[in-house]
Amino acid sequence: MALQNGHSKKQLDVVVVGGGLVGSLEALYLAKRGHRIRLYEFREDIRYTPQARGRSINLALSVRGRRALKDVGVETHMIEEHGIPMKARRIHRMDGSTYAIPYDARTKQCIYSVGRNYLNARLLQGNLTFT
Ligand SMILES: Cc1cc2nc3c(=O)[nH]c(=O)nc-3n(C[C@H](O)[C@H](O)[C@H](O)COP(=O)(O)OP(=O)(O)OC[C@H]3O[C@@H](n4cnc5c(N)ncnc54)[C@H](O)[C@@H]3O)c2cc1C
């Protein structure tokens, strides 16, 4: 296999096992590089199953995660329509009072709460526009 700058120039047949967040994102990255991908998932297809098994709690998406999504063409659409910005964490003192600690007071960035299955389904969709 010819390698240049750490990347294979040859089109490869790649099998990805597990269509969760990591597997589906990795499959898109590899497809973007021109490889042929076959993705195997144990669960039923969450795109067509309203009550899919597995993790369900919302995901807190940081700037690093959003960058990865943007790389495969997802970020803007998903964040705008489904993301709930979380600008700070609320601390509860023993006396019942509370205060907030911003996630990033300097750059005013925030993390976004997103539906895990929604995000996973978007990544599995596979008809994304690469940027
Ligand atoms: C309660 C909770 C809250 C979390 N909150 C956050 C958060 O806010 N932000 C954050 O960044 N991370 C969070 N995480 C971590 C995040 O969920 C994981 O890092 C992420 O889900 C890992 O993705 P994954 O694709 O590796 O695994 P998974 O999402 O578990 O996907 C693995 C997939 O592989 C499939 N599979 C397993 N075995 C096989 C097999 N033999 N053949 C085929 N398919 C198989 C499974 O069915 C599953 O779909 C949280 C985790 C938990 C438990």
Image (cartoon, rainbow, N blue to C red):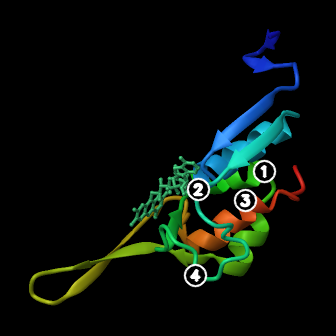
Q: Check contact, mark 4 vs mark 2: CB within 8 A.
A: no
Q: According to the image, label 1 marks what residue?
A: 72
Sequence-first tag of 3 and 4: 4
Please name the residue that numbered disc 2 is placed on. Answer: 42
Of the residues shown, which amino acid type is indicated by label 4?
Gln
Give the mark nearest the N terminus, 1 or 3: 1
Q: Helix, strand or loop at disc 2?
A: loop
Q: CA distance from mark 2 to mark 3?
A: 16 Å
Q: CA distance from mark 3 to mark 4?
A: 18 Å
Farthest top residue in view: 2
Q: CA distance from mark 1 to mark 3?
A: 9 Å
| Pointer 2 or 3: first along the chain | 2
Q: Nearer the viewer, mark 2 or mark 3?
A: 2
- Asked if the residue under mark 4 is in contact with the one under mark 3, i.e. CB atoms within 8 Å, the reply is no
Secondary structure of the residue carrying tag 3 is helix
User: 66 or 10, which lies in front?
Assistant: 10
Q: Which mark is residue 51?
A: 4
Outermost residue toward the bottom?
96
